[in-house]
């Protein structure tokens, strides 16, 4: 298996959804559970692209709803790897409402941890992450701090 280091850009993923009545809750806003499903799928695509393996979600660290989205809105989910362990990857997915003029408003930020799986569904090593700019280094350091905080809380 090729474990050559990769950059966040190598597995960056965007997905787009147009909201319809089937995605709305009783208040005519995007149902939060539907957005969570899309976030999980986006994160899985990112992790698969980084690891070249099947993956499974093991943790949703943060899922912060900032603003609602309404029927006929265009929702864009942007995912990237921010931290890599031996077999796991931390993925950030940011969700935006894209307006007709192309501008975007952040509606959700999420951080998930996914693990790469071998042919027997056992955790398997993943490529290292090569950081190329200050924004990536900051996201990496924040993810590392979240991991260390979780480890401290589990002791």
Image (tube, rainbow, N blue to C red):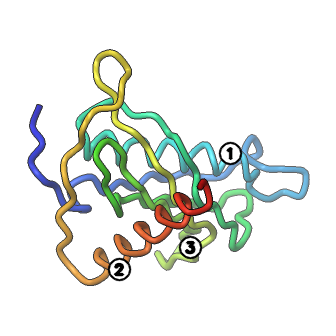
Circle 3: is it few (<14), some (14-19), or many (20+) Cα within 10 Å?
few
Question: Toward the viewer: 41 or 102?
Answer: 41
Q: Secondary structure at mark 2?
A: helix
Which residue has dot 3 on it? 99
Q: Is residue 99 left or right of residue 135?
A: right
Quarter of the image where one finds residue 70: bottom right
Q: Residue at x 25, y 41 (%)?
A: 51
Instruction: Tell me, for residue 144, which label it has, or none.
Output: none
- In the picture, measured across the screen, residue 82 lies left or right of residue 71, that is left
Q: Which residue is mark 1?
A: 34
Foreground tag (3 vs 1): 1
Mark 2 to mark 1 CA distance (whole Å)? 29 Å
Mark before the other along the chain sequence, 2 or 1: 1
Q: Residue at x 26, y 46 (%)?
A: 50
Residue at image point 68% right, 45% down: 34
Say which of marks 2 and 1 sits in front.
2
Give the percent coordinates (x, y) of residue 124: 28, 32
Q: Quadrant of residue 83?
A: bottom left
Residue 15 position (above or below residue 69)? above
């Amino acid at each position: 298996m090729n474990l050559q280091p990769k950059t966040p850009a190598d597995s960056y993923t965007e997905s787009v959804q147009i909201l319809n009545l089937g995605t709305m809750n009783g208040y005519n806003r995007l149902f939060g559970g539907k957005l969570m499903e899309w976030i999980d799928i986006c994160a899985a695509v990112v992790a698969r692209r980084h690891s070249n393996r099947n993956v499974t979600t093991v943790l949703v660290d943060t899922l912060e709803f900032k603003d609602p989205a309404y029927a006929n809105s265009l929702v864009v989910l942007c995912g990237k790897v921010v931290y890599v362990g031996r077999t796991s990857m931390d993925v950030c997915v940011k969700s935006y409402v894209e307006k007709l003029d192309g501008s975007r408003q952040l509606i959700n930020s999420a951080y998930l941890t996914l693990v790469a799986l071998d042919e027997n569904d056992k955790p398997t090593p993943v490529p290292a992450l090569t950081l190329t700019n200050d924004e990536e280094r900051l996201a990496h350091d924040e993810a590392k701090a979240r991991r260390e905080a979780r480890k401290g809380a589990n002791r």
